[in-house]
Image (cartoon, grey):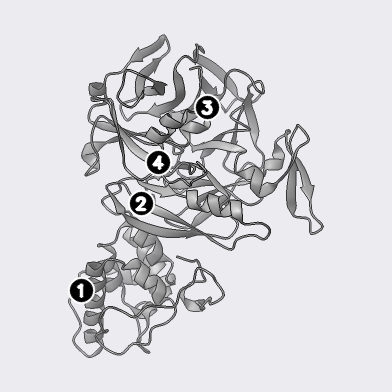
Amino acid sequence: MTHRSPCGGCRSNHGDPLHRPPPEPPRPLPCHISIPIRFVRIREVFSSSSVLSLFFFFIGLYMSSLEGNPPASGSDSSCDDEFSSASAVGTYTGPSWSDLPIDVLLGILQYLEVPQRVVFASVCTTWKLAAAVNGVPRSIVPWFMSWGDHMKEKKTVHGGRRRTLTCSFHHLLDINKTYDVSFPRGCFVACCGASHGWLVLVNELCNLVLYNPFTMAMIDLPPVTDFSCVEAIYGDSGILEHCILSKKRVHETSYLGRWFYQKAVLSCSPSKHGAYVVMIIHRDRDWLSFVKAGQSKWQVASTLPARGKDRYADCAYHGGRFYSVTLHGMVEEWDLDELNGPTRKIIVAAGHLGRTLTRHLVSTAWGDLLRVRLISAPECPDGVRFQIQRIDYDGCKKVMYTDLMDHAIFLGLNHSSCLATKSFTGLQPHRIYFSAPCMGQTLDWPCRISRVLGGVGTYDLKSTRFERASPLTDDKKGWISPSEVWITPNL
């Protein structure tokens, strides 16, 4: 979908390369209606033939009501009040998509998946308000967003900035169910995190932004020039164009943005209240920084020696505090509220790297903080396996798969999560769902291992077997796409 102004000022955008002329509907409308340009979006919403038939059925009821045969209404009276500003109910002046009554819109929304609702909300103001009032659907199984094709396009585009970017959202339990979601111009050069339904994106100025693809809300974070290792170079127009790192290397901002940030985690959803905190791992995993809501500058919490033996691998928010873990296993607890700056407490000391390929921190619903590591294991069928430990102040304790209590773990660029499979139909207990190429950023993996773990897959903790959930996308030059991102809808 392409983002254009809402219904009241919705204009066609024939110059947009993503715009396609509206196709013919698969069946005639119940009565004559002139189809505007935004019918392209409506067809995107109702991509399923069954849902499309349902859509025309509702419109048929609506048209019958205009002829003096109103359909039965099951909506609350409060809906009329909610949408009075959208002019959805009132004097009829002519057939129009934006004139569809709220009863019809809310009825249709019950049958739409979350990505379809994103397209639905972009059609016009009335439809956007209907999507907002309808709320989060009952089924909120995590989706994963792929953006590797975008990175390959960026490698071939020289000069000029893209107007919009379209990424694919895939349903975990039905890989063939895919929806394209467009992002605002200039806000997406790379993705380095997903928390509570929000994506952490890098824009073309190498700054981070929080973006909710389900509500299209956006929050700008402080600029990259806050960091002492970055020196800004501005163009004649006063816009940041290049950055100089501490080694005096000059980089275009969009190029720097693709590798300067490794991971970002939010303490909570910005949608609920303003007291969120963002922690990031960046500068080749040597730096750990954070910013609180409303602050205008980044604060550096920790820096590891450049080209040292250890690097940050993950961070997580657990029990009101942030925690970080390094490749060598050191676990740090952070207090970000001290007047003299952030302070840390080492919970687990660093050890030897050994066979460790990467590490993650996972906060559980029953109060445990887990340390998950992927190790090379020649004795296993796929050559690698996961190990899970519970972090205590007196050390780490091994966790058996039965200790997960019918939960599943999600690892990747997202904030690592542990979900109850009973609450998410289709999820399998005692499994790790992972998007692996991001793990490969920690070390130069052998090609065989990257082929096993590339793309999106699952790991059965009981059988120690891997299973691919999506195809590995690469080209003949051996390019492995960046990590798919797990994201749970949050409206």
Cα distance between the residues tagged 1 and 2: 34 Å
Cα distance between the residues tagged 2 and 3: 27 Å
- The answer to whether the residue labelled 2 contacts the one labelled 3, judged by CB atoms less than 8 Å apart, is no
Cα distance between the residues tagged 1 and 4: 46 Å
**Residue 443 badge:** 3
Q: Residue under label 1, please give it.
A: 73
In the rendered structure, which disc, 2 or 3, sits on the residue that comes first in sequence?
2
Return the residue nearer the eye: 94 or 191: 191
Other-residue count near label 2 (Cα within 10 Å), few / some / many at <14 / 14–19 / ≥20: many
Q: What amino acid is found at the position of numbered circle 3 in the picture?
A: Leu
Cα distance between the residues tagged 3 and 1: 60 Å
In the rendered structure, which disc, 2 or 4, sits on the residue that comes first in sequence?
2
Other-residue count near label 1 (Cα within 10 Å), few / some / many at <14 / 14–19 / ≥20: few
Please state the horizontal and vertical placement of residue 4, each as a whole percent of the image. 51, 70
- The answer to whether the residue labelled 1 contacts the one labelled 2, judged by CB atoms less than 8 Å apart, is no
Which quarter of the rendering shows the N terminus?
A: bottom left
**Residue 170 badge:** 2
Cα distance between the residues tagged 2 and 4: 12 Å
Give the foreground label among 1 and 4. Answer: 4
- The answer to whether the residue labelled 3 contacts the one labelled 1, judged by CB atoms less than 8 Å apart, is no
Helix, strand or loop at mark 3: loop
Q: Residue under label 4, please give it.
A: 455
Helix, strand or loop at mark 2: strand
